[in-house]
Amino acid sequence: MISFALSLVALIVGYMVYSRVAERVFGPDDRVTPAVSRADGIDYVVLPGWRIFMIQFLNIAGTGPIFGAIMGMWFGPAAYVWIVLGCIFGGAVHDYMSGMLSLRHGGEGLPELTGRYLGGKARGALVVFTMMMMMLVGAFFVYCPAIILSGIWGSKMMWVYIIFLYYVATTMMPIDKVIGRVYPAFALSMLFMVVALGIVLCIKHPVLPEVWDGLGNWGAARLGLRQPLFPALFVTIACGAVSGFHATQSPMMARCMKSERQGRAIFYGAMITEGIVALVWATVSSYFFFQEGWRQVCPPDVTAAFEGQTALSLIQYFDAPTVVNIVCASWLGTFGSILALLGIVAAPITTGGSSFRAARLILSEAFHLRQSSMRSRLLLSLPVFAVGIALLAWQIGNPSGFGTVWQYVAWGTQVMAAITLWMCTVYLARERKFYWMTLLPAVFMTMVVTDFFLVSPTILGLDYKLSLGIAAIITLVCITRFIIWKVRRGGSL
């Protein structure tokens, strides 16, 4: 529990200190924001700062900081280090810089910002890539909540229809009519769940593995985990540390801000909050898997069923959603369990809805189409909904197959993070600002996504040492290209 307490303090201090450093580097001012200069009552609408924070938090969270943190802790206490350092120096900086760049450039989305700083080819590739990612995320976050809700009441298909109709509403309606009113309440539900679990952890105060007990791959020997800690840990825990998906959501909030000075709390602050969510669930996971907490929280029939399956490992029997359901029911009681599950269900639903809305906005920017009328929004959204329905139908028919696809999505979001960090680095370098703030995490994430692509058995499956060597060479090439570009512009490193 000492590592948990120190990590929690570090995240809070990180926000208090490093967020101000990031703010000073970017330099927000009092210029008119897009929400005021381009107000259209649809996407550009001024909202209260606290409401924007809640929406941003829920948009970027999803189930990522919950399920990802649970699976990330399978690797051991190294997860604490990644959540803290990744969040403060990587993810929060990534979110703040990309969000502020969108705010500074009229609420532009990630592909347009990428084209502005990395060139037209990068823009075209990212339009296709982000559209694919948004529709995959949207489809995935229909069926999973439907499964959970059907366990409470109704059928899976009934909830699939309801959730998808909700997606249509969040994609088409003005942002202050549905998202602005519903999301803050759902965010509070999720925050309640995290605070409640944190309190129970402090009360129980279990003896857990600490960072100084070793940063190696604990899961290899104890849980039968086959993936190497590097780079798998840094892809598994994405939303709780660094996630490129956030750069697709921040532009929606950039279009609702009245002042650039709100950016530190909204963009950097929401990411730190998400890091705290990941920290709590990582600690729960440590208790559950490494200190046999599963024996304490599981009903007797579940415990007996597992012990009868000697060929199964803990992580095969207790997947992340199962851990969430068991822990919430055991620790928070009936009322608390319902509220906690609502937070867990609401997060993916709201993130999925926002993904479809982001897809509409990306298309409108790519083809320079106005979105002022309902007819124009509907015509642009129809192909997005059609692809989403097709993906959803495939997922329902092949539930296990989508798990494999989701590994590509997890890798894809980290690819977007690396691209976003490079884009922010180029911006800071062009403006003669402290670009090392984004360059270092850009280099690290480039190494991570390249190595994962090479070594993952679901992608290329190369030898571990060979993949590390190739990834290092590719990363070095990226650094060299940046240095050459920087020198040609007449600047020194």
Image (spheres, grey):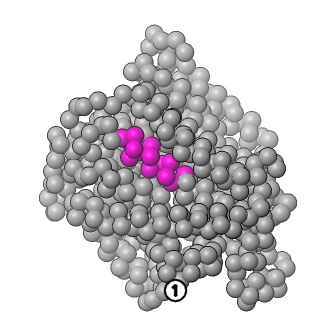
Q: Is residue 273 magenta?
A: yes
Q: Is residue 81 above or below residue 311?
A: above
Q: In the image as oriented, which residue stretches furthest toward the front?
A: 203
**Magenta: main secondary structure:** helix
Q: Is residue 472 above or below residue 411?
A: above
Q: Position of residue 486 (x, y in %)?
A: 49, 17
Q: Position of residue 334 (x, y in %)?
A: 53, 83
| Location of residue 205 (image quadrant) | bottom right
The amino acid marked with disc number 1 is Gly
Range of the magenta residues?
263-275
For image coordinates 74% across by 35% down, the residue present is: 469
Which residue in the protein does label 1 denote? 151
User: Would you say 39 lies left or right of 17 here?
Assistant: left
Q: Nearer the viewer, residue 314 or 325?
A: 325
| Location of residue 314 (image quadrant) | bottom right
User: Would you say 480 lies left or right of 96 here?
Assistant: right
